[in-house]
Image (cartoon, rainbow, N blue to C red):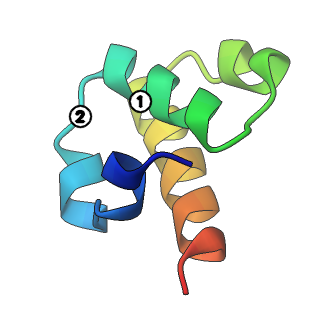
Amino acid sequence: MTTTVEKMNAADIRAKSKEELVELATAFGIEDETIQNLSRREDLLSKVLQTFQLNSF
């Protein structure tokens, strides 16, 4: 992950557009097929936040 991603918090992630969430999902290592199956922004946001929280120390 990049330094920018490491400095993010959940509020930063919630403020992202769907396109930005797709970029974050890719940066977090979420598979492309999974990203494509999450058509709603809210679903993608939930997955990105879940992954972010699992990878936070």
Taking the image as shown, residue 42 lies to the left or right of residue 14, namely: right
Residue type marked 2: Lys
Q: Is residue 44 above or below residue 14?
A: above
Quadrant location of the C terminus in the rendered image: bottom right
Mark carried by residue 16? 2
**Residue under the image location 54 percent in, 73 percent down:** 53
Looking at the image, the residue that sits furthest to the bottom is 57
Where residue 11 sits: x, y (%)? Answer: 19, 62
Where residue 15 sits: x, y (%)? Answer: 16, 43
Circle 1 residues within 10 Å: few <14, some 14–19, many ≥20? many
Which element type, helix, strand or loop, lies under badge 2? loop
Circle 2 residues within 10 Å: few <14, some 14–19, many ≥20? some
**Residue under the image location 60 percent in, 48 percent down:** 47
* Residue designated by label 1: 21
Q: Is residue 44 above or below residue 57?
A: above
Residues at badges 2 and 1 in contact (C-beta under 8 Å)?
Answer: yes
Taking the image as shown, residue 51 lies to the left or right of residue 37, namely: left
Residue type marked 1: Leu
**Residue under the image location 32 percent in, 48 percent down:** 4
Where residue 56 sits: x, y (%)? Answer: 54, 77
